[in-house]
Image (spheres, rainbow, N blue to C red):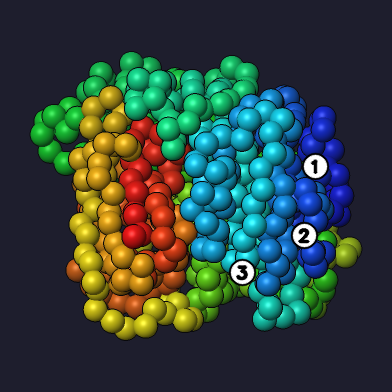
Amino acid sequence: MTRSSSSLSLSRRGFLAGGAAAGALAVSGRWSRALATPVLTVESVSLDVNGKAAKVFAVKGPGGEGLFAKEGDRLAGAVFNASQSPAVLHWHGQILAPPDQDRARPNGGELAVGGTDLVDFVLTPGTHWMHAHTLSEQQLLAAPLVTREADAGDVQDVVVMLHDFSFRTPEEILAGLGGGSGAHGGHAMGQPMQGAGTQGMPMPGMAMPGMNHAGHAMGGMAPAGGAMPGGAMGGAGAMGAMGGGMPMTHANDVAYDAFLANRRTLEDPEVVRVEKGGRVRLRIINGGTATAFFVTVLGLKPRCIAVDGTVCESVEAEAFPLAQGQRIDLLVEIPAGGGAFPVLAHVEASPRRTGLVLAAPGASVARVAEMANAPQGLLDLSFESRLAAAKPLAARAADRVFPVMLGEEAGYRWTINGRVAGEAEPFIVKQGERVEMTFMNPTSMSHPMHLHGHHFQVVGIGGRRFSGALRDTVMVPPHMPVTIAFDAGQKGEWFLHCHHLYHMAAGMMGVVKVA
């Protein structure tokens, strides 16, 4: 593959009708100085995925898809829903958004088709994003919401937005997992779920007929990375299905048709032009609904300088884990001699991958296969344990301590402290209190736990206390407790949920109420 594209040009495999340029996600400096009204528009568009059209969503700002601002800017203006379905947006990573605006609509309701709503808050600096808080997120109702830090320096910013993609509707996927409309209405925030798409099939070699999440009709687990027809994978469900023992750990309970980087596959990846001898800040967002990735940059030595939009002490690694909802900023230096450097996102427990290519002038860009030579392993917390916040929370004793037990029950029912969304009492705290939560996970899958309206610090993994990174989403693997600490922020009700979309839709969501 030798074709290249400007980071701000229209992709020929971008939107077929009414869409923004996929290349607009890879930004090289054009940050807004003032955010105009209307500030955002949600649209229904068509996307070409490996030669097949799909109906998806796009969120457009004044300069194309997503929103790119500078520290100190406000997100102030109208949000207009020009799509064909009601919309609910969450401002992921924004700590200054009021609770009603964090749910995107006054009183937490939906923005009707053709409706307009107003938002107004100071943007939180860093690499953040916005996405639906219903199943519409699966159909790419998500976009970058990046606010460039005042001290970012002389670097080229390249935003990489990752997605998992299916031609099936999210309702079909959830029903295939054993959930669907019977599982707590399948609603996030109590709102009807909207979706559009065409019937698709699981990827070749991934189907295991006769299995379901709770029952294990074939008497065993699917291998890591495997899946069943309809999107279901053999999970633990009722523990009795495995003879009363611990559930077997696995990943990827949805069979996806493609994985996208800036809405493109490795069949036709975006090629971002970079300068010889220049520095590039990769702002990578995992917008996948049910997929975790490992990120690598071939031919370069990336350094992690921020996670979830907050600065951390610099850390090098061969591969960087990225759970659903998480972000990571990687700093790379392009050699003076130039070259082409693939930025790859490898699917957890799978050989599949997606990505884009950084290319200096005159570089030859070779095609990168979508299937690696070997599958990745499961995400763990080895990298997390190496992270440290550049500006950690002030040392103080916790005012409130909560155990948070993550649960898995038959019928694709996912719980927090034994309850599904809407059943449990909220975690009640007072503004300014230091709060600690310890997540415990005896289930068969990892859970990326996200708290709205706050950044928290990871302060414990297993039995070890340490001063870790500031985040808004942390991966909780099976059988490995994780403790977080935060100072209760703005008054209101803030969602605490698993960022695996179908776990959330099937119940794994609670509320932290700041009184």
Q: Is residue 352 visible?
A: no
Residue 87 located left or right of residue 383: right
Q: Earlier in the sequence, mark 2 or mark 3?
A: 2
Determine whether label 1 and label 2 are within 8 Å by CB: no
Residue in view at x 72 percent, y 52 percent: 77
Residue in view at x 21 percent, y 65 percent: 401
Residue type, label 3: Pro
Residue designated by label 2: 35
Depth check, front residue: 172 or 384: 172
- Residue 20 - label: 1
- Residue 189 - label: none
Q: Quadrant of the C terminus?
A: bottom left
Residue type, label 2: Leu
Q: Position of residue 4 (x, y in %)?
A: 85, 51
What's the CA distance linking mark 1 and mark 2? 18 Å
What's the CA distance linking mark 1 and mark 3? 24 Å
Q: Earlier in the sequence, mark 1 or mark 2?
A: 1
Residue 5 located left or right of residue 369: right
Q: In which quarter of the view is residue 513 placed?
A: bottom left
Residue 303 located left or right of residue 230: right
Q: Earlier in the sequence, mark 1 or mark 3?
A: 1
What's the CA distance linking mark 2 and mark 3? 15 Å
Q: Position of residue 299 (x, y in %)?
A: 66, 66
Of circles 2 and 3, which is in front? 2
Depth check, front residue: 360 or 113: 113
Residue designated by label 3: 125
Q: Pick out the residue farthest to the left.
A: 244
Of circles 1 and 3, which is in front? 3
Of circles 1 and 2, which is in front? 2
The answer to whether 193 is drawn above or below residue 27 in the figure is above
Crowd class of label 3 (few under 14; some 14 to 19; many from 20; radius 10 Å): many
Crowd class of label 2 (few under 14; some 14 to 19; many from 20; radius 10 Å): many
